[in-house]
Amino acid sequence: MAIAELGAVVLDCPDPRALAGFYAGILGGTVEGEGDWVDLKLPGGRSLAFQKAPGHVPPKWPAPGDSQQFHLDLTVADLDAAEKGVLALGATPLDTEDRSRTWRVYADPAGHPFCLCAC
């Protein structure tokens, strides 16, 4: 039997509302809250939360000597179309070396790495 159930994944960032809006543009859902804590309520009942961290330092990727802290894998049907969408929302490509792979790596506007993964 499980001891707990996952409530939400929480990302530290300088502007919770703006970063929630970025992910809402990718994942859909509804942005709720203001100030230091904002939730993105996703279809299917999941949520992604954003917490204000004034001293936020973005993780480095790739950096063998530094931790990326975490990353999100986002499943998509069409990598090229999804890439156009995330770039329009403000994502930054982190890995443009090998376009033959089934995933591509980006940073969100606060610098957190995420991958678009072909399903």
Image (cartoon, grey):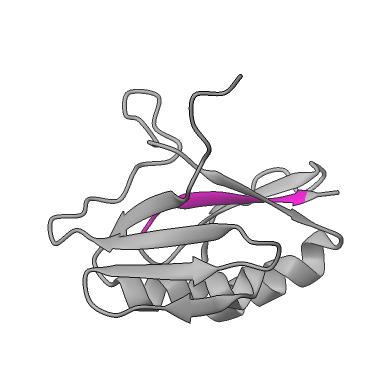
Quadrant of residue 33 within the rendered picture:
bottom left
Left/right of residue 57 with respect to residue 10 in the rendered view: left
Does residue 118 lie above or below 37 as drawn? above
**Magenta span includes 112:** yes
Residue at (28, 72) in percent of width and height = 15
Extreme residue toward the top, this view:
1
Report the residue at 38% width, 36% height from top: 69
- Tell which of 106 and 39 is nearer to you: 39
Q: Residue placed farthest to the left in the image?
A: 55
Specify whether 65 is left or right of 119.
Answer: left
| Residue 2 in magenta stretch | no
Magenta-highlighted residues: 111-117
User: Residue shown at 64%/68% (left/top)?
Assistant: 27
Observer-nearest of 103 and 97 = 103
Position above or below: 68 against 82:
above
- Identify which residue, 57 or 100, lies in the foreground: 57
Q: Position of residue 35 (x, y in %)?
A: 22, 77
Give the camera-side residue of 93 and 71.
Answer: 71
Q: Main secondary structure of the magenta part?
A: strand
Percent of width and height locating residue 37: 28, 67
- Residue 39 drawn at (x, y percent): 42, 68
Q: Quadrant of residue 109?
A: bottom left
Residue 95 visible, this orientation: no
Please indicate, yes or no, whether residue 64 appears anywhere in the rendered image: yes
